[in-house]
Image (cartoon, rainbow, N blue to C red):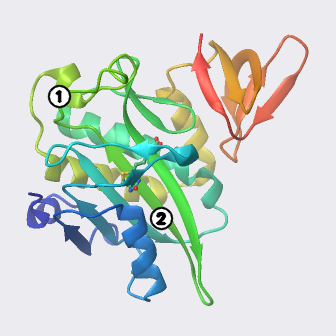
Amino acid sequence: MIFTNLIQTNLKTSWVGKNIEYYSFTDSTNDDACELILNNEAEEGMIIITDYQKKGRGRRNNKWLSSPGENLTFSLILKKDVKKLPLLSILSGIAVVKGIKQFANIECNLKWPNDIMLNNKKIGGILIETKNMDTDSYVIIGIGLNVNQQEISQELVSIASSLRIENSNPIQREPLLAFILNEFEKLYNTNSEQWPILWKKYCNHLNKEITFHKDDTALTGYFINIDNHGNAIINTDSEQISVSTGILEIL
Ligand code: BTN
């Protein structure tokens, strides 16, 4: 059970999270957000949250698995701001890492573009989708964060984890979410040119050797920066290139 009043009492925002839709279970909060937009029931800053997401979706058509009653699975609806859109993924990752640090004093970091990492294992992910309507266009920021989950399936245990597994203490999810949303709104109001600079502070593979996998190709080089569209800048033996999609492997 998620207590939405506990989220609200910890919020210091003026528009993010002022309206929270809670479902005890649902297929996907990103799909719910999309439906609210289609029905003209969406408001900027609205949060859709569930305690049991049954068909969570991840990036690249992956599934997002989250054990019921233990984690955070939610979506935030924004109106599309064309200038900020390319960097929203970068911004969301920073907000999650900062919120966790502020509330639970745990230092997570980021793997490009926005995987939330702790002790080199993934504990959270972000799926950003857009929905264009006749009058307004919207952005849906879906965030899954493994908070109190204590068991990870055998096939994922070497690469995935949770705050609880890495830190041993249970964490109250509602104030944690409020702290993340507080950070989100604060950052959203700053100049987006600063976001890549901040993101690099939290990146766990800056200047490290990495390989990008895309379709059947692999490209190895040093991850040296992100540009102001959130693309990865890689130095290979022969050239400097910008990468917008792909799976990053840290060597
Ligand atoms: C990833 O692949 O790393 C992104 C995972 C995003 C999962 C979240 S959970 C809440 C929202 N609803 C979904 O169906 N997916 C996102």
Q: Considering depth in this image, is 167 or 226 the residue closer to the camera?
A: 167
Q: On the image, which quarter does residue 43 sit in?
A: bottom left
Q: Which mark is residue 140?
A: 2
Q: Would residue 82 appear left or right of 76 to someone viewing this image?
A: right
Work out whether residue 13 can be spotted.
no
Above or below: residue 194 compared with residue 166: below
Above or below: residue 181 compared with residue 113: below
Q: Residue furthest right?
A: 238
Q: Considering depth in this image, is 243 or 56 the residue closer to the camera?
A: 56
Tell me if label 1 and label 2 are in contact, CB under 8 Å. no
Question: Which quadrant of the rendered structure holds the N terminus?
Answer: bottom left
Q: Residues within 10 Å of mark 1 (few under 14, many from 20)?
A: some
Which residue does the image show at 12% across and 37% down from the upper left? 171
Tell me the distance, in whole angstroms, between the alpha carbons under discs 1 and 2.
27 Å
Which residue does the image show at 68% across and 18% down from the upper left? 211
Horizontal and vertical percent position of residue 208: 62, 12
Element at label 1: helix
Element at label 2: strand
Q: Which residue is mark 1?
A: 164
Three-letter amino acid code at disc 2? Ile
Q: On the image, which quarter does residue 216 sit in?
A: top right
